[in-house]
Amino acid sequence: MRIAEWGEDRPAERKGTESSGTPRRRPCCRRTRGAGGPERDDVGRRGEAPRLRPRPERPAGCGRATVRRLLSTSQSSVDPKEMRKFQLLAHRWWDEQGEYSALHSMNDIRVPFIRDTVLNMGSAYQRGSPLSGVKILDVGCGGGLLSEPLGRLGASVTGIDPLEENIRAADQHKSFDPVLAKRIQYKCGSLEEIVEESVETFDVIVASEVVEHVADLEMFIKCCSQVLKPGGSLFITTINKTQLSYILGIVVAEKIAGIVPEGTHEWEKFVPPEELERLLEANSFSVKTVNGMLYNPLTGSWSWIESTSINYALHAVKSGDQAQTSQTEPLSEMESEQCSATAGTSV
């Protein structure tokens, strides 16, 4: 993302004339900048050294100025309206009985889905830390609900979110566990902002309950492809765009049952799996799995189903060397149970 220059060049001087008609000379005033150095005004006055003007430092971290700049750009997948919604609930991420209770319980199926798929893709299994050595990017990490169990499995996790309040909540909760403090780092910013510094950096990208909130889905997918290593995995969970998803996901979940706050979702931004597959395949991905998901509000639990008419989870692989894929056997039942015990979350 281009950062606006600190200061603007002075307008060009107009040439004036003396009363005699002879052109009047003006001191030559120009602004130059050395590589990486401060701005300098070179004024053509004899015997006077150029005046150095220190360049203001860029604000550190991701404060409100950064968020405003992020929202104002037309080249961002971040939707300002969506940010305002989640900003109001940033302090509620780790309340298991609160507005995010459904996301807490979703970990029971999405964490094993990610873990087992990654291991079956060829990662060497290590008891106690099955995802050791795997670099994961959690896009739209919120308060860290998914980053933490992945970190407990041994993965090196980078969580990004455009809301400073969310990152603050994630950092605070992570600090309670010294092991997680070493394995997880959170950054305030958008996916577009880290592309240049993170080209083909990550083994895995997770975007869980995110794509239905982005402003530009195609740009989002392109950025995922750029920061993912060849042969790396992309995991997405989201909501299908059907009449049933409108009735259950918005009318029932938001307006009647209050499972999530009213206004959390916009049906127009829901993504059919066919559309998502098309975008992925156009950006060097091969879709491997699409599974339906169902939430039971009476039990507060999620389960896998065949139908993708409401919620679904998708796994795609970026084109590249996947020779290891065919050589790996699925996890045994015992290994899977051992991994599940390791991934258990604590609040």
Image (cartoon, rainbow, N blue to C red):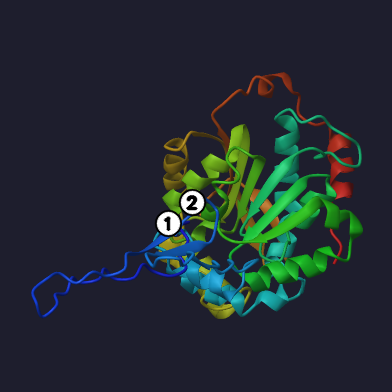
Q: Is residue 253 left or right of residue 69?
A: right
Q: Position of residue 326 (x, y in %)?
A: 67, 20
Asked whether the residues under the numbered discs 1 and 2 touch, taking CB atoms below 8 Å apart as contact, a structural biologist would say: yes
In the figure, 17 relative to 238: above or below? below
Q: Is residue 241 visible?
A: no
Quadrant containing the C terminus in the rendered view:
bottom right
Q: Position of residue 67 (x, y in %)?
A: 54, 70
In the figure, 225 relative to 326: above or below? below
Residue in view at x 47 percent, y 61 percent: 3
Q: Position of residue 277 (x, y in %)?
A: 46, 41
Residue in view at x 61 percent, y 80 percent: 88
In the figure, 321 relative to 142: above or below? above
Disc on res. 273: none
In the rendered structure, which amino acid carries the disc numbered 1?
A: Asp
Disc on res. 220: 2
* Mark 1, other Cα within 10 Å: few <14 / some 14–19 / many ≥20: some
Q: Quadrant of residue 155?
A: top right
Q: Is residue 276 visible?
A: yes
CA gap between label 1 and label 2 equals: 6 Å
Q: Residue furthest left?
A: 21
Q: Is residue 183 left or right of residue 60?
A: right
- Label 2: which secondary element: helix
> What residue is shown with label 1?
216
Q: How many marks?
A: 2
Q: Is residue 276 left or right of residue 169?
A: left
* Mark 2, other Cα within 10 Å: few <14 / some 14–19 / many ≥20: some
In the rendered structure, which amino acid carries the disc numbered 2?
A: Phe
- Label 1: which secondary element: loop
Residue in view at x 84 percent, y 35 percent: 333
Q: Who is closer to the viewer here, 312 or 208? A: 208
In the figure, 78 relative to 318: above or below? below
